[in-house]
Image (tube, grey):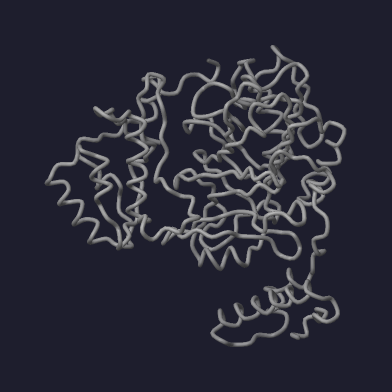
Amino acid sequence: MSYIIVTASDDKTSEQRCKEIAEALWTLQRPRAIRHPRDVTNSFCGVVMHSDGRAALVLSTDAMIRPHEQLDTAELFDSMPEYTTQKKTFVNAKLAANYGVEIKVSDILPNAFSYTSQDEMEGDGWFPSIED
Amino acid sequence: MLGLGVSSASQLGGTAFALENSILAAFKTRVLADSGVVEDYACLNLDVKDLITEPAPFTTGLLEFYPGAAAAYSLRQLRRSVSPYAIRVRRSGDSLEQDIGFNSNGELDTNALLDFANGGDAWVTVWYDQSSNGNDATQGTNADQPQIVSSGSVITQNGKPTLNFDGTDTFNIGSSDVYGQARLDAYCYMHSTDNVHIMFSQATSGSNYSYAVHDGSTSTTLASAYADASSKIYVNGSDINVIEGTTTRDDLHTAIITNGAANLNGAIIVHEDVQTTSWTDFKISAYANVWTYTGKMSEILLYNSDQSAKRTAIESNINDFYSIYS
């Protein structure tokens, strides 16, 4: 498994940002406008916490997502100010060209995001011994 | 009538009527698969024989014999007049969700499940609590939902539907009926060759967890805020004799997995007289893709009261249905 550590912003914690991003990603596959009120799924990926307050998305480097034709990228872009204008243009085009077809999530994330491996996370103290 | 040896609806009532509908559906599927050609009886029989051998209609469930569960999850019906649904599932492709109930025999309605899955995959978003306490186990994260249908086929264990946990999957139970309890007796039917896992935990942290099963670990720290000297673990009805300070996590792995859940038919694992007094939430399985369960799980019963006098009977009820051990 791999992870994306998300830094806190001025008004949101790292955990809050991770949850927003995970939910925004799910809106690409299942837009809020078409969800049933009883739908339970609302998040694309999990979130792990470090004891120091940092949070990370649990996201495989080869995770795939299936863009829905009624998607709206506003929530996605709002959740990640790391997007550049150029990247937003690329993402919009990528999604529009692949409605109903699986694409790699890594292709549509901001370039500023980077993956961290399980070993690196463990070395950085993300998963303390269960004996603690 | 198809002439397949099934009594008519008028003779047997609604159960036979539902059965005959199932046979008709199987018959139709078979004929369509063969481009509309009706084959001979022997060939058709391959597809419908399981339906012809009619299981007993559902009458009384485990929770009616052994009531008082704080939460009870299964893919079979555990009592009458409970939630009409066993699970809520999300299918691949369009990610639609739908509730799936039971058939007239008290088993998961796999016809409805497969119709909904439409040849693809399906994952469980809610495992409905059948205890009547409404303590449904839920998972709202796409990547953490256990799978029940793979490429148009129901995932099974001992021929019965089961949930497949892939090592990242978990459920949350947000109820103080199961956390904050001075006594918990937990029953699980599982099949697994997992090397490391925790079956229950408080949350996404290293604190408060049930027995740590870890192949090769010499640690004698077996649990946190969960077990004490009076707690016991039973594997297929046998006390594995956990001794605080002596039993290792590797010993647990040998007893629970190697000699139990790794067997072809899986195993019934019982945590008896454990506690969640200081827990503030409850999760099936654990955190961070390190201690998360990998394997199949078909039934979990959680009692927050002493069931030791009924343990053998409860295990027998589970065993009778799933045919786990003799």
Q: Quadrant of the C terminus of chain B?
A: top right
Instruction: Say above or below: B306 vs B88.
Output: above
**Could you say where residue B179 lies in the image, as x and y percent from the top left?**
63, 29
Q: Residue at x 51, y 66 (%)?
A: B119
Q: Residue at x 27, y 41 (%)?
A: A79
Taking A78 as reference, is B33 left or right?
right
Instruction: Say above or below: B227 vs A76.
Output: above
Instruction: Say above or below: B17 vs B255.
Output: below
**Could you say where residue B278 lies in the image, as x and y percent from the top left?**
62, 21
Taking B2 as reference, is A26 left or right?
left
The quarter of the displayed image where residue B259 is located: top right
**Could you say where residue A118 lies in the image, as x and y percent from the top left?**
39, 29
Q: Quadrant of the N terminus of chain B?
A: bottom right
For the image shown, how many numbered marks are present on the structure? 0
Which one is in front, B265 or A16?
A16
Q: Residue at x 36, y 42 (%)?
A: A22
Instruction: Say above or below: B205 vs A112.
Output: above
Which one is in front, B28 or B206?
B206
